[in-house]
Amino acid sequence: MSEVHSELQCQAQFLGYDFDTRVGRLVLAEGECVDMTGCVSIFERIDPNVRQIQTVAGEELDTVYTRTTAGWLAA
């Protein structure tokens, strides 16, 4: 079992980023949820122009964070 990541506040199993589409993907342990602020911060350090972050808990798409002109929206 992996440790709780201090910035994400959850057990992260995989983090990936597609520089062409500017979309990040974070896979979490089943039943986990991520701290949005920490998640966005990590991906913005990878690419300040990240436009979307998808989180997956277990095998289910959990949350999609999308950058808008008003800021980050979670759906």
Image (cartoon, rainbow, N blue to C red):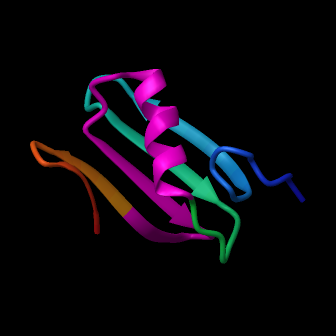
* Occupied quadrant, residue 20: top left
Instruction: Judge left or right: residue 15 versus residue 45.
Output: right
* Occupied quadrant, residue 19: top left
> Residue at (51%, 46%) from the top-left corner?
39
Residue in front for this viewpoint, 47 or 60: 47
> Residue at (66%, 77%) from the top-left corner?
31
User: What residue range appears in magenta?
Assistant: 35-63
Position of 10 relative to 5 (above/below): below
Position of 71 relative to 11 (above/below): above
Instruction: Judge left or right: residue 9 versus residue 59.
Output: right
Membership of 62 in magenta stretch: yes
From the image, which quarter does the C terminus lie in?
bottom left
From the image, which quarter does the N terminus lie in?
bottom right
Position of 4 relative to 23 (above/below): below
Disc tally is 0
Residue farthest toward the bottom in the current orientation of the protein:
31
> Residue at (70%, 65%) from the top-left corner?
29
Residue in front for this viewpoint, 35 or 51: 35
Residue farthest toward the left in the current orientation of the protein:
69
**In x, y percent, where is residue 35?**
55, 57
Instruction: Judge left or right: residue 36 versus residue 47.
Output: right
> Residue at (25%, 38%) from the top-left corner?
51
